[in-house]
Amino acid sequence: MFDLIRNRTSCRSYLDKPIELEKINQIKVAINNSPTARNLQDFSCIFITDPQVRERLYVYADKQSHVKIAPLFILFLSDQNCLNTPTNWSEVDATIAATSAMFAAEAIGLQTCMIGRIVHHEKEINELLHIRGKTKIVLGLTVGYAQNKSPHSIKVNRCNNETYDLSQIK
């Protein structure tokens, strides 16, 4: 597991190869078993394989080509439609679920890339995907077989001991 975490990179170049249904279902299992804050499970996701829909999402994601090239795009939503009382946790839960999906995909031989810019066109995406009610787009995830594996980059240490150290960030 640590090798998977340490060596993972974002993928922006995918093969034109569909993902097997079994692998898609494994990703769904990972998402549905993700931990959530306060056990509310107040998120939803939409699995998108239709090339025409991915083409539209590509435009809404500021024309990041991997959104339309990847055979699978998963959109993660904070979703408070099932709750009687609104919370501030649903965006956190959607992000946790996206991280679970990312690592599940990587564990079964797929590559991924988180897409944050997708949030800038929420109205258009809500209309396109029939998203209604108390929801908010949190992020997207491209998934597929890598055409070229990106080289691993050295990550900056974001861990502090006992207190926050601003000098460590700069």
Image: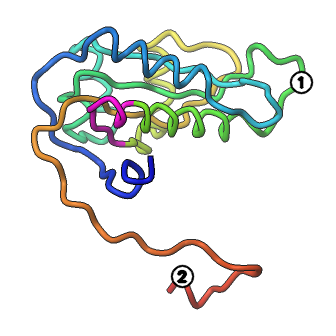
The percent coordinates of residue 14 (x first, y second) are 15, 34
- Residue situated in front as seen by the camera: 17 or 3: 3
Residue at image position (66%, 35%) is 93
Residue type at the position of mark 2: Ile
Residue at image position (24%, 44%) is 11
Residue 57 occupies quadrant: top left
Left or right: 99 with respect to 113?
Answer: right
Residue type at the position of mark 1: Thr
Asked which secondary structure carries label 1, the reply is: loop
Within 10 Å of disc 2 (Cα), the crowding (few <14, some 14-19, many 20+) is: few
Provide the residue designation for mark 2: 169
The percent coordinates of residue 88 (x first, y second) are 78, 39
- Residue situated in front as seen by the camera: 44 or 159: 159
As drawn, the residue found furthest toward the right would be 85
Residue at image position (22%, 14%) is 52
Residue 78 position (above or below residue 134): below
Indicate yes or no whether the magenta region holds residue 85. Answer: no
For residue 85, which numbered disc appears in the image? 1
Magenta span: 105-113
Asked which secondary structure carries label 2, the reply is: helix
Within 10 Å of disc 1 (Cα), the crowding (few <14, some 14-19, many 20+) is: few
